[in-house]
Structure formats: structure tokens, C-alpha cells
Image (cartoon, grey):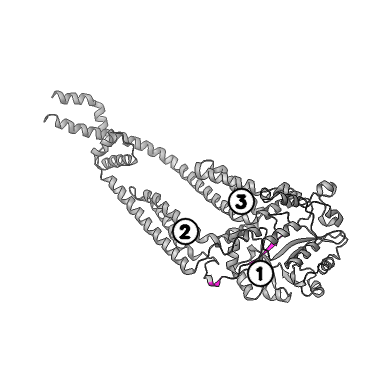
């Protein structure tokens, strides 16, 4: 036994040297190939992250733009002349691309190019809609902040695993600095977050009144008697409509420049279907159906929820005149706000259209103060003829100029109604109406801002919002903010400490443990790390695996052991 002990010790050293040489050669080959591929991997990783973030912002934009889907489809109709729901292919493509990038992690370039093309197209077609992103942050900002803090905190596990491993490299230092910068920026982000719903509940104003914009166009064909009756069922405070003048001087309700989208003019007057709507007389207009298109196109995906009675009623709707709307408002004690479209120069009522509207108002019997006049043309003439009309401006003007025009009501698109502007108008006793407001989150933000009324295509949705979606005092928000930051900081520190302890424990393994793990072929990432640590520690200590391997190759391992045994 004594004779064989030096041989066993030497055999163990020989195995260790062989492993050192083999792993050292393999490591060099791997390092050379890794240097070549690491640049491509980093590039693809950056492209992947960029695609994911771009798709994330793109998805968020379309999620919040749901308030204006009808406006988008109408805009497409005016350009193409064909009515279709243009949001469906966009949302489908976005969902597929987002899922593809998030779960499969392939097809990155195709998804990236598709998304960039979509962004450029929307910027050209619907540029004003980008404001919805900043406005929506007033509602979602505090919650997105907490979600971002949680996500970056969880990301600390991966960052710590890279930073505490081995010697410090430039990449590790840069990664740590970037991570800490992002984390600190998120901790301080609430200083830049502003929401009107962060307020004391005692300061909340009265619930804004809801105006039925073209009635209730999601429940019945727009600008029809049925639509306005549906709006009454949803407790609207007023009606809003678009008015055009017929060839024989009858004001009627029509949003589009032609009759193609909302009537069956293509069936009755195929050669005149592209003519201006005002170039038809009232008898011709009255003969058209104003409801069949609604049942056929189903623009809001709501026809399937209509009763059989309502479907039959919708199919029998005709174009509504301004006189019918005003008389309905008189019977139900509702106000009316309408926008007038001036007829083309060749129209026989081109010089008399304002008088035609005035006569209709007087014939209806409605109280003058119930009518909100928005047209700037001939405003002085109209005010002189009917002095009690509510003068309403659709142009954002200084308060002094509004008062000079006797306008005590301002109607603005929601993107123009900032919180500061709303509160300034409120202090000046100028009533503000905001349009279009179809989503509860936007209605809540405007409610907290102090808006008096909103015009909506979806009064049935806003009716279900008895109070803002959320409201919290500044003290409550500060408490949530500081608590989330402290918890996040504690978790991040704990992660780095644990990863440091975990890696230091791996360095304590001795060669016998590593060799035993290699013999039993235990599949473990930790074992591979320990082997690398052992190999490079041997190389650093001066063991030249190449020389030792050449010695044993020369004499032969078996020959040496036989010599030792024979002795």
C-alpha cells in the first residue's frame, strides 16, 4: 500500500492536468468563437428590445385611442369613400406582432418594420391623435409608475447575476450604472407626474353633464329620431347635431358631405350618389332610408345586441330635419347644440341659409336660450335677430374676446382642454364643453379637472360612471409613492447581497468536489462555473497544462503506470 500511494497521488495530479489542458483548449476555442458572435448577439438583443418597446408604446396608443375609433373610421371614409372599420386590421396586426416578439422572440425585423410603417402612416393621417398618449398618462401615470418600479426591481435579479460574477469588466460596470440610473429615475418620476385626480375629495366639482352627440349613435343610426330618443333614455342633458340646408331651404341633419355612407342614395339615385348632400331637395332626401346602412355595416359592433323590435325600427328610419329635433328638445326640455355646414356657391339658398335656420328655430317653439349657436359667420346678425340664443364658440380664444362676442360657452376638442385652461375658464365664469368623450377614464379626468359638460357618442357608457374611476389625496399618493420606492430599494439590495453570497459559495468548492461532480455527470450550471474557476486558478498559479500534456503524450500514460507498478 505504501508503494502505491505516490502513484495514486500522481495519477490524481495527472487527471487534473489533463482536464486543465482539455478545458483550457476548449475554452480558448469557445472564447474565439464567442468574440465573433457576441457582437451579433448584442445587436440582435438591442433590435429585439427596441421592437418590444416600440410595440409596447404602439399598443398603448391604440388602447387609449379607443375613445376616437369612430372619428378614425370617419376620417378613412372621407379619404376612400368606403365605410369600414379600419381599426380591426391595425389592432390585429399589433396584437400578432406584440405576441410574436414577446413570446417567440423571432421575426424581429419584420415586426419592427411593420410597426414603424404604421407609426409613419398614422402620423400622416391622424397626427393630432398622438396627444391622447400624454392625456392618458394623467389617468394611468401613477399606476404605470408602480408597475415600472416593480418590473425594474425584478430585473435586478438578472443584473446582479451579471455584475457579481468574476472580475469587474467595463460591460459589468456600465450595466450596473445604467440599471442604477434607471432605478433612480423611476424613484423620482412622481415629481413629473401630474393628474387632476390627485386632489382632495371635497374639491371635486359637480358631475359633468352629458350631451348626446348625434344622439346615441352606438345604439341607433346617427342623427335620426330613434338615435335621439335612445339618448333621452340615457339621461342626456342636451342634443348635438350637424345641420345641412337642402335645395328648397329645409335644414336637415347630416354629418357627411354626401349621402352615400348613411343612406341608400346609391340605390335610388345611383348617378347622383357622389353629389353634395345639400344638392337634393327635401322630398328626395325624405325618401331615403337612414337606417339600413347601420344594420348592414354594424359600425359599432352593437347590432347583435339589439332587439328585433329595435332592428325593425332602425331599418325604417328616415333623415331627420332640424325642425323635428328642435320639437323633440322642446317636449323633453333639452338644449340643442348644432354645427351648420354652409352650402356650395351654386346652391340656390347660398345667401339665405342663415335665415332658413332662424325661421326653423322660431317655428319649432323652442325657447331661444335652449339653443347653442356655434357658427361664427353672421354671429352679430343672428344675435340681433334672436338675442337670447346661447352664443357658443368653437375657437379657443382669450376670455376677454369671448366676452366681447357675448360667448359664455366654449366647445373644444379634449386635446385642447388642458387642466390649467379648464380651471382658468371656470374662474372666469365661462362654461366649457369638451368633445368627443366616450371612455370612462377620459370622462373621469375631465370631471376632476372641472369641466361642465361633455359631448359623447356613447352616453350609455358614461351613464355608468357615477364618480371618477379613481381619486386620491396628495398625502395618500405620497405615501404610496414613498412606500413602493422603499420596498423596491430593500428588495434590490437583498438581491445583490444574495447573489454575492451565492457566487462566493461556489468559489469554496475544492478540486475533489469538482472532479466528483464531473464523474457523476451532474447537469448543473454551478458545476460548469466551478470547473472554469478551477481551470483558470490552476493556470494563474503557474501550471502549464500544455507542457504537462506533451510530457504524457511522449511517454504514454499506460507505459508510465506499468513502469510504476512493476517497480
Q: Which residue appears farthest toward the left when viewing the image?
A: 2
Q: Quadrant of residue 370?
A: bottom right
Q: Quadrant of residue 564?
A: top left
Q: Locate the C terminus by quadrant.
A: top left
Q: Locate the N terminus by quadrant.
A: top left
Instruction: For marks 2 and 3, give the CA distance.
Output: 27 Å
Instruction: For marks 3 and 1, give the CA distance.
Output: 32 Å
How many numbered dots are placed on residues in this image?
3
Q: Which residue is mark 3?
A: 119
**Would residue 203 be counted in the magenta stretch?**
yes
Q: Residue at x 47, y 56 (%)?
A: 148
Q: Which comes before the other along the chain, label 3 or label 1? A: 3
Q: Which residue is mark 1?
A: 432
**Would residue 477 be counted in the magenta stretch?**
no
How many residues crowd around disc 3 within 10 Å: few (fewer than 14), some, or many (20 or more)? Answer: some
Task: Tell me if 325 is positioned left or right of 249 in this view.
Answer: left
The percent position of residue 420, horizontal first and vertical second, equals: 59, 70
Q: Residue at x 81, y 75 (%)?
A: 384
The label on residue 251 is none
Q: Quadrant of residue 405?
A: bottom right
How many residues crowd around disc 2 within 10 Å: few (fewer than 14), some, or many (20 or more)? Answer: some
Q: Are marks 2 and 3 in contact (CB under 8 Å)?
A: no
* Label 1 element class: strand
How many residues crowd around disc 1 within 10 Å: few (fewer than 14), some, or many (20 or more)? Answer: many
The percent position of residue 350, horizontal first and vertical second, equals: 85, 63
Q: Are marks 3 and 1 in contact (CB under 8 Å)?
A: no
Q: Which comes before the other along the chain, label 2 or label 3? A: 3
The segment highlighted magenta reads: 202-213
Amino acid at each position: 500500500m505504501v508503494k502505491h500511494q505516490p502513484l495514486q497521488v500522481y495519477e490524481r495530479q495527472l487527471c487534473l492536468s489533463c482536464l486543465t489542458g482539455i478545458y483550457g483548449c476548449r475554452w480558448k476555442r469557445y472564447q474565439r468563437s464567442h468574440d465573433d458572435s457576441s457582437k451579433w448577439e448584442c445587436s440582435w438583443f438591442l433590435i429585439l428590445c427596441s421592437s418590444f418597446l416600440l410595440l409596447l408604446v404602439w399598443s398603448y396608443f391604440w388602447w387609449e385611442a379607443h375613445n376616437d375609433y369612430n372619428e378614425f373610421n370617419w376620417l378613412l371614409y372621407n379619404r376612400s369613400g368606403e365605410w369600414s372599420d379600419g381599426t380591426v386590421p391595425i389592432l390585429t396586426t399589433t396584437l400578432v406582432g406584440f405576441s410574436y416578439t414577446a413570446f417567440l422572440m423571432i421575426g424581429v425585423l419584420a415586426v419592427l418594420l411593420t410597426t414603424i410603417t404604421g407609426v409613419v402612416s398614422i402620423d400622416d393621417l391622424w397626427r393630432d391623435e398622438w396627444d391622447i398618449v400624454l392625456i392618458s398618462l394623467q389617468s394611468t401615470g401613477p399606476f404605470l409608475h408602480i408597475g415600472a418600479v416593480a418590473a425594474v426591481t425584478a430585473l435586478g435579479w438578472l443584473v446582479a447575476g451579471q455584475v457579481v460574477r468574476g472580475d469587474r469588466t467595463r460591460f459589468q460596470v456600465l450595466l450596473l450604472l445604467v440599471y442604477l440610473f434607471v432605478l433612480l429615475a423611476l424613484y423620482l418620476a412622481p415629481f413629473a407626474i401630474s393628474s387632476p385626480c390627485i386632489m382632495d375629495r371635497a374639491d371635486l366639482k359637480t358631475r359633468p353633464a352629458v350631451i348626446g352627440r348625434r344622439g346615441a349613435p352606438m345604439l341607433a343610426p346617427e342623427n335620426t329620431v330613434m338615435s335621439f330618443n335612445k339618448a333621452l333614455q340615457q339621461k342626456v342633458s342636451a342634443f348635438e347635431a350637424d345641420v345641412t340646408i337642402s335645395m328648397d331651404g329645409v335644414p336637415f341633419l347630416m354629418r357627411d358631405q354626401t349621402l352615400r355612407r348613411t343612406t341608400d342614395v346609391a340605390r335610388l339615385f345611383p348617378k347622383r350618389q357622389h353629389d353634395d348632400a345639400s344638392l337634393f331637395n327635401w322630398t328626395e332626401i325624405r325618401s331615403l332610408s337612414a337606417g339600413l346602412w347601420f344594420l348592414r355595416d354594424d359600425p359599432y359592433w352593437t347590432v347583435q345586441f339589439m332587439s328585433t323590435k329595435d332592428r325593425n325600427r332602425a331599418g325604417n328610419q328616415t333623415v331627420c330635419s332640424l325642425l323635428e329635433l328642435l320639437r323633440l328638445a322642446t317636449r323633453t326640455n333639452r338644449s340643442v347644440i348644432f354645427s351648420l355646414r354652409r352650402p356650395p356657391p351654386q346652391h340656390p339658398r347660398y345667401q339665405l341659409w342663415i335665415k332658413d335656420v332662424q325661421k326653423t328655430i322660431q317655428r319649432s317653439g323652442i325657447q331661444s336660450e335652449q339653443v347653442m349657436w356655434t357658427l361664427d359667420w353672421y354671429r352679430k346678425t343672428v344675435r340681433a335677430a334672436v338675442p337670447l340664443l346661447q352664443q357658443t364658440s368653437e375657437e379657443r380664444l382669450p376670455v376677454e374676446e369671448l366676452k366681447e362676442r357675448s360667448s359664455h360657452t366654449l366647445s373644444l376638442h379634449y386635446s385642447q382642454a388642458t387642466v390649467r385652461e379648464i380651471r382658468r375658464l371656470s374662474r372666469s365664469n365661462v362654461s366649457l364643453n369638451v368633445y368627443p368623450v366616450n371612455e370612462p377614464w377620459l370622462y373621469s379626468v375631465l370631471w376632476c379637472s372641472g369641466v361642465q359638460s361633455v359631448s359623447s357618442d356613447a352616453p350609455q357608457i358614461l351613464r355608468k360612471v357615477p364618480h371618477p374611476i379613481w381619486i386620491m389625496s396628495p398625502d395618500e399618493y405620497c405615501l404610496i409613492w414613498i412606500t413602493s420606492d422603499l420596498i423596491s430599494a430593500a428588495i434590490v439590495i437583498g438581491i445583490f447581497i444574495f447573489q454575492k453570497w451565492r457566487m462566493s459559495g461556489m468559489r469554496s468548492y475544492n478540486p475533489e468536489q469538482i472532479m466528483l461532480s464531473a464523474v457523476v455527470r451532474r447537469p448543473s450550471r454551478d458545476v460548469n462555473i466551478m470547473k472554469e474557476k478551477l481551470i483558470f486558478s490552476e493556470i494563474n498559479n503557474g501550471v502549464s497544462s500544455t507542457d504537462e500534456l506533451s510530457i504524457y503524450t511522449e511517454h504514454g500514460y499506460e507505459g508510465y503506470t506499468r513502469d510504476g507498478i512493476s517497480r
